[in-house]
């Protein structure tokens, strides 16, 4: 390896280690996903300029997804007009896609905002949870006691394809 290549490698490694140290200090994981950082497992099923749609990190039902702004926002009241407009479009698309792929009998949709809400990540994210007959209650879902029933890789593939068709 030439000196030049060795130096480039050394610079890259230092930057990578720094990034890990920043993560340990509380770097926002949703900002990292929005930035497409490669060390994060691929969870996204759709993207626009302003929003990302991913599988939930810990899905409780097939098709449990999160819709969140690429910008670090912690409260819905901080959305600007462009974000509200895009949010409406993507929320509709998400419901259409989940209905097409999973044919649920309902949805629970909501935010956890603020430290007393049970939010594990401050970066604002809308949970969209498809519901099926003969299930446990929503509080069981929000408290994380459900067990996943579909391989997340399969969920991701099915939803990515459906979002690509829906959003064009
Ligand atoms: Zn963030």
Image: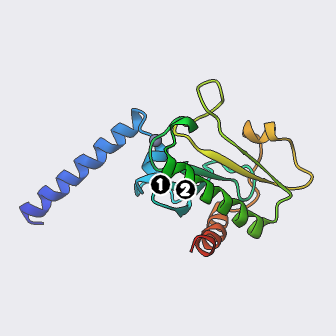
Residue lying at 74% horizontally and 58% vertically, measured from the top left: 62
Q: Residue furthest front?
A: 81
Residue lying at 42% horizontally and 54% vertically, measured from the top left: 39
Which quadrant is home to the C terminus?
A: bottom right
Which quadrant is home to the N terminus?
A: bottom left
Secondary structure type for disc 1: loop
Residue 98 image point, x, y percent: 73, 63
Residue lying at 51% horizontally and 47% vertically, measured from the top left: 81
Q: Residue furthest left?
A: 3
- Along the line of sight, the residue nearer the viewer: 98 or 1: 98
Decide: is 56 above or below 161. above
The residue carrying mark 2 is: 86
Decide if residue 40 is on the left or right side of residue 167. Answer: left
Decide if residue 30 is on the left or right side of residue 147. Answer: left
Residue 37 image point, x, y percent: 40, 54
| Callout count | 2
Decide if residue 124 is on the left or right side of residue 10. Answer: right
* Neighbour tally class for label 2: few under 14, some 14-19, many 20 plus, Cα within 10 Å: some
Residues at discs 1 and 2 in contact (Cβ within 8 Å): yes
Which numbered mark, 1 or 2, is in the foreground of this view? 2
The residue carrying mark 1 is: 50
Please identify the quarter of the rendering in which residue 111 is found: top right
Residue lying at 25% horizontally and 51% vertically, measured from the top left: 13
Give the alpha-carbon distance from disc 1 to disc 2, as whole Å. 7 Å
Mark 1 vs 2, N-terminal side: 1
> Does the Cβ of the disc 1 residue fall within 8 Å of ligand 1?
no
Residue 30 image point, x, y percent: 49, 46
């Amino acid at each position: 390896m030439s000196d030049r290549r060795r130096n480039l490698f050394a610079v890259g490694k230092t930057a990578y280690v720094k990034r890990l140290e920043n993560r340990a200090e509380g770097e926002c994981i949703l900002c990292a996903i929005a930035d497409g950082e490669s060390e994060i497992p691929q969870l996204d099923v759709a993207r626009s300029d302003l929003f990302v749609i991913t599988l939930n990190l810990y899905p409780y039902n097939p098709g449990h997804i999160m819709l969140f702004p690429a910008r670090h926002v912690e409260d819905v009241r901080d959305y600007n007009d462009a974000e509200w407009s895009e949010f409406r479009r993507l929320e509709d698309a998400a419901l259409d896609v989940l209905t097409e792929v999973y044919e649920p009998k309902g949805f629970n949709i909501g935010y956890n905002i603020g430290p007393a809400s049970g939010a594990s990540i401050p970066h604002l994210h809308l949970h969209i949870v498809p519901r099926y007959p003969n299930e446990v209650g929503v509080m069981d879902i929000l408290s994380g006691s459900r067990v996943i029933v579909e391989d997340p890789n399969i969920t991701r593939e099915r939803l990515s394809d459906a979002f690509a068709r829906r959003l064009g």
